[in-house]
Image (cartoon, helix red, strand yellow):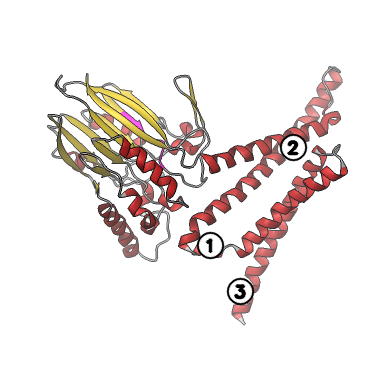
Amino acid sequence: MSERIIDYQIDMRIVLFILLLLGFDLVVYQSVQLAIHEWSSTAKLVAGAIFWTIPVLFICWYIFGQNQAQDKSKEGNYRLQRSIFQLIYLAKVVLLLASGLFLLIHPLLQTLHYFIPSIPVLTENTQLFAQIAVILALGLFFLMLYGILFNRHRYKIHRVSVNLPNLPSSFSGLKIVQISDIHSGSFTDKAPLKKGIDLINQEAADLVFFTGDLVNSIASEIEPYVEVFSRIQSKYGVFSGLGNHDYGDYVRWPNREIKEANLRRLMEIEKVMGWQLLMNENRLKNINGVSVAVIGVENYSGSPRFSKYGKLDEAYRGAEKADIKLLLSHDPSHWDAQIRPNFPDIDVTFSGHTHGAQFGIEIPKLFRWSPVQYAYKQWAGLYQAGKQYLYVNRGFGYLGYPGRVGILPEITVLNVASD
């Protein structure tokens, strides 16, 4: 009897959700009808059929497609489908907000019209404003859809150089390739990833750095892609650090032991891939006649919202006399919070974490904007303070929104030379 009651409650929640969804769509449809009021009967019929087909498809997917979420082999496709439906309803929300703006400014314009008759009364242009709202919503949808279909794996190589003092003039340079924020749990296909790895290997780098967030939360997410990322090559090794997502902090684990086992599994996988994971430690390399310290610190954030596992004093120990000190630290806020004030001889810090918000505008040397800049002072590209540098990688993968608009996935090629 109790099982039947539980099933009934679950079914009622689904029914309630469907009713709320259809009610929302009905409200949105009023704005659409106003926008297409002057269309022919046939055109209006086609537009209405297209509009109502989408919620029907979504409801069918919501009821019958949930098994994909439980199937690891189909989990990526499930997330992709979910994201497309989310985009559709985000566009509908934008349409409603834009249409609702009329209700907010209508009384103001009516008052102004009373005193200044040349100002048009908005009620005379309701169809025009409904059409503008529809165009804005469709524009946002197709822009974000383009980011999913064409930009998810459209890797862009960013080439930068830094000149360091106190290096011998005979130093012939050092080429470093950096990637960050793979987020393997978001992937749906290996083929485009292999193209990205080919771009990395074509650089024939001295060192390759990965600065954290290999997975979204669970170590098993990377297992289907071990062979792909094992192909990364460099002359002196591939070095990596942990990001905030790698610890499994965003999963409700049955107990602490299982969570710790998940992290150990992740560490084992990185070893299998041939990567040298640096857990608050460093490695010394003799490259082109100079001593290079590769220092790796666990995730450390200057924000209270994220973890502080990193122990930079431990990671730094033994690297004091190196000619070049290179630090892998996932979160760029670490630079101002601890690195610059306490370790002024760390030459270059490599970070990621921000993804550049996967959304923004970049016009080289002219203009750059992303909403993430309101949360992070350093959010993408090269920064300098005195003799120290920070490079923030825009991310190799994606999280949440499975695409990119304006901020493309990045492969960094950084050259170190003598000043």
Observer-nearest of 333 and 93: 93
Q: Residue at x 28, y 24 (%)?
A: 162
Quadrant of the frame with the N terminus: bottom right
Residue 288 placement (x, y as % from top left): 15, 29
Magenta part of the protein: which range?
390-396
Disc 3, SS: helix
The residue identified by callout 2 is: 99
Comes first in the chain, label 2 or label 3: 3
* Mark 1 burial class by Cα count in 10 Å: few <14, some 14-19, many 20+: some
| Contact? badges 2 and 3 (CB < 8 Å) | no
Q: Amino acid at mark 1?
A: Gln
- Calculate the distance from the C-alpha at mark 3 to the C-alpha at mark 1: 23 Å
The residue identified by callout 1 is: 68
- Calculate the distance from the C-alpha at mark 2 to the C-alpha at mark 1: 36 Å
Observer-nearest of 348 and 159: 159
Q: 194 above or below 377?
A: below
